[in-house]
């Protein structure tokens, strides 16, 4: 996924000013595709120059509040991107590489870092579960928001995986667990 596609998606969901868009990234899309406010504004300008979005409203001058909407060419570009064939991306996580290095160097200090990561994943899972409770109650199941809910469910499942994996990593080597030396 790329930032232009994330922005086009967000603007198709709801035309927004740059500030509103950055806030929406901070609250939802940013969980899965993060971007700084500067990157979002820079990309909005590029999308506008390419004729994929346009700024509208009574105050669309420089330095004024602009509301952006997706133009037909932007919708077509996003539709084309959605249909592309793309292989899954391999996992590239520094924590996994650090564990590999610790296997060679020793694990001094690694337990604290694993515990810190576990707490961060626990907090993220709690946030996702609260969003699910608030935005996707059972009585609304089957509505058009199904695909949005699936994206959130992916986040919930990924955080659940990381918690289980970190619990395993923090428990120590299997030999130590079998002998009762944790």
Image: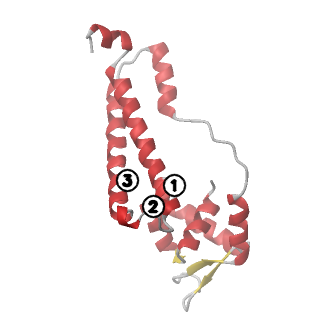
Q: Kindly report the distance in space between the C-alpha atoms of the residues bearing marks 3 and 1.
A: 16 Å
The first of marks 2 and 1 along the sequence is 2
Residue linked to disc 2? 28
| Sooner in the amino-acid sequence: mark 3 or mark 2 | 2
Within 10 Å of disc 3 (Cα), the crowding (few <14, some 14-19, many 20+) is: many
User: Residue tagged by mark 3?
Assistant: 128
Q: Taking 108 as reference, is 154 left or right?
A: right
Query: In x, y percent, where is residue 72?
Result: 71, 77
Measured from the top left, where is residue 111 in percent x and y? Answer: 33, 25
Residue reaching furthest top?
179
- Residue 12's place in the image compared with 111, above or below, is below
Q: Are marks 2 and 1 in contact (CB under 8 Å)?
A: no
Would residue 8 appear left or right of 51 to someone viewing this image? left
Q: Earlier in the sequence, mark 3 or mark 1?
A: 1
Cβ–Cβ below 8 Å for labels 3 and 2? no
Is any part of residue 171 visible from this angle? yes
- Circle 1 sits on which residue? 34
- The answer to which image quadrant residue 4 occupies is bottom right
Q: Is residue 95 above or below residue 143?
A: above
Q: Residue at x 47, y 31 (%)?
A: 95
**Crowd tier of the residue under label 1, counting other residues whose Cα lies within 10 Å: few below 14, some 14–19, many 20 or above:** some
Residue 179 spot, x, y in % from top left: 29, 7
Q: Nearer the viewer, residue 38 or 26?
A: 26
Dots 3 and 1: beta carbons under 8 Å? no
Picture quadrant where residue 57 is located = bottom right
> Residue placed at 52% from the left, 73% from the top?
18
Q: Alpha carbon of mark 3 to alpha carbon of mark 2: how far? A: 10 Å
Determine which quarter of the picture holds residue 161. Answer: top left
Badge 1 marks a residue whose secondary structure is: loop
Image location of residue 140, percent across then percent down:
40, 67
Q: Is residue 137 visible?
A: no
């Amino acid at each position: 996924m790329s930032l232009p596609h994330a922005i086009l998606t967000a603007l198709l969901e709801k035309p927004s000013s740059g500030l509103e868009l950055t806030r929406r990234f901070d609250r939802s899309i940013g969980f899965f595709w993060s971007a700084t406010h500067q990157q979002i504004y820079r990309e909005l300008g590029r999308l506008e120059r390419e004729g994929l979005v346009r700024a509208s409203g009574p105050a669309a001058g420089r330095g004024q509040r602009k509301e952006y909407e997706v133009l037909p060419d932007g919708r077509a570009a996003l539709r084309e991107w959605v249909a592309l064939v793309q292989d899954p991306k391999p996992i590239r996580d520094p924590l996994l590489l650090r564990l590999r290095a610790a296997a060679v160097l020793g694990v001094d200090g690694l337990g604290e870092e694993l515990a810190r990561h576990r707490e961060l994943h626990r907090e993220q899972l709690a946030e996702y579960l609260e969003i699910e409770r608030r935005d996707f109650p059972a009585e609304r199941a089957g509505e058009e928001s199904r695909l949005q809910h699936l994206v959130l469910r992916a986040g919930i499942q990924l955080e659940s995986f990381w918690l289980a994996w970190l619990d395993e990593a923090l428990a120590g080597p299997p030999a130590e667990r079998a002998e009762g030396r944790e």
